[in-house]
Image (spheres, rainbow, N blue to C red):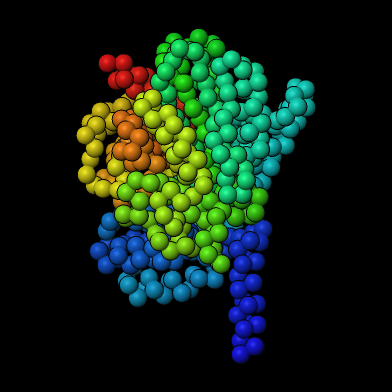
Amino acid sequence: MNRLFSFVFTFACLAIWSINSERAYVHDKLVRLEPFTDEHIHYLQALEETTSLDFWTEIMAPNRSVDVRIRANEYDQYVSQFKQYSLPYEIIVNDIQEVIDNEEKELAQDRLMRQIQSRWLGEAEPRIVGTYATYKQMETYLDEKAAADPTHIKVIDIGKTYEGRSIKVISIKMNPASTRNIWIDCGIHAREWITSTTCIWLTEEFINEYNNRDPIIRQILDKWTVYVAPSLNPDGYEYSQTSGNRLWRKNRFPTNVLCNGVDLNRNYPWKWNTGGSSTSACSETYCGRSAGSEIETQNVVKFLESLKGTWDMYMSFHAYGQWWFTPYGYTTGLPKDYQKQLATAQAGANALTAVRGTKYAVGSISGLLYIASGSTCDWAYDSLGIKHSYTIELPPTQQQSNIGFVLPVSEAPAVCRETYVGMKEFLNKVHEDTAQ
Ligand SMILES: [Zn+2]
């Protein structure tokens, strides 16, 4: 018995060590599955619900492919199941760690260049616009923006995370008389680094273009105070950058003795746990113990509710897939404002596409993709009553998912630039709609 206990204990320690070691994805594979029956779909849904398999793309319907990361030590077991179910599969990436190592090398070079540049320019800190910054660097960036224009720009600490970091939001209030607000958040899913980079880029451009008297941005920022939250999940973000677990998605709350993390975008207190999320504490889409159970969720809910009735737009950035989503996620039913939302989002997507041809699909979450309950987008629309509530999934597309979440940093500026152009036109259209 003692020998059995020590064997199990040693195995558990090894398993935890392998998860937390610096190179967590050696020989992990990205596998593309081609389900073609309802039975295949139900099997995959059960896997997502009950295991910690990491689905990179959503399980939709027969004849829509699904990409999943399979750990090296579980690969044979799953492949024999796929064969048993006659489920076609192919390996897209043979060793995910290699993709991550390449990204790391490129990022290290990018950081070095930025350090050299800052020394050359005599600046205290390297510039972070257009790169994957640390959370600390983003906090410093926000503080610097506020210090440069304290009359109009403030940094608000909306509350602490589980590990005690502050969730910071920058408010840009160019017109002291404005009473209406808009909200943009990023990084609720830790590994979607490009989203936080986008939030910083938008902040930079809003301020620069306002000061350069761009007429559209003047109109937008004279009407609204803009709130930007570069990371709604700083613990997860930090963990994804420093622990070797680049593909970490959730927050860092210990959910049971073996697992950490609640999917914050399944934890919002609206139609919580009504589909498209998991009640298993180790699942990548674990919805938490109760609606709004997570401290990070509570902070955001409290802040947005404190200004309820003043919000004209809510936008949450995710990656990846190139989708511009409207509500709903929890039901295939459409909200009463759907046609207006669709037209507004389409205007933004068209402007974005015009920059360099990047195409987005526009429509409701459940209509285009899948049922997902407890997301911020539905909560913002139904619970906060924000007519213009959206979610954007940044590049790449599923077809390019041999990189997926690991978008090379050299591609970040182009993604941010086109997204800014799309957002500007989109906000212009929201402005027109809310002026009436
Ligand atoms: Zn996401």
> In the image shown, does 430 or 369 lie closer to the viewer?
430
> In the image shown, does 215 or 102 lie closer to the viewer?
215
Q: Quadrant of the N terminus?
A: bottom right
Q: Quadrant of the C terminus?
A: top left
Q: Residue at x 65, y 77 (%)?
A: 10
> In the image shown, does 217 or 63 lie closer to the viewer?
217
Residue 417 to residue 236: above or below: above
Q: Quadrant of residue 365?
A: top left
Is residue 247 at least partly visible in the picture?
no
Residue 72 to residue 174: above or below: below
Q: Residue at x 65, y 66 (%)?
A: 17
Judged left or right of residue 335, residue 317 is: right
Q: Residue at x 43, y 48 (%)?
A: 292
Q: Position of residue 241 (x, y in %)?
A: 63, 48
Q: Position of residue 214 (x, y in %)?
A: 48, 12
Judged left or right of residue 253, residue 51 is: left
Q: Residue at x 46, y 51 (%)?
A: 293
> In the image shown, does 88 or 13 lie closer to the viewer?
13
Is residue 39 at least partly visible in the picture?
yes
Q: Position of residue 103 (x, y in %)?
A: 61, 46
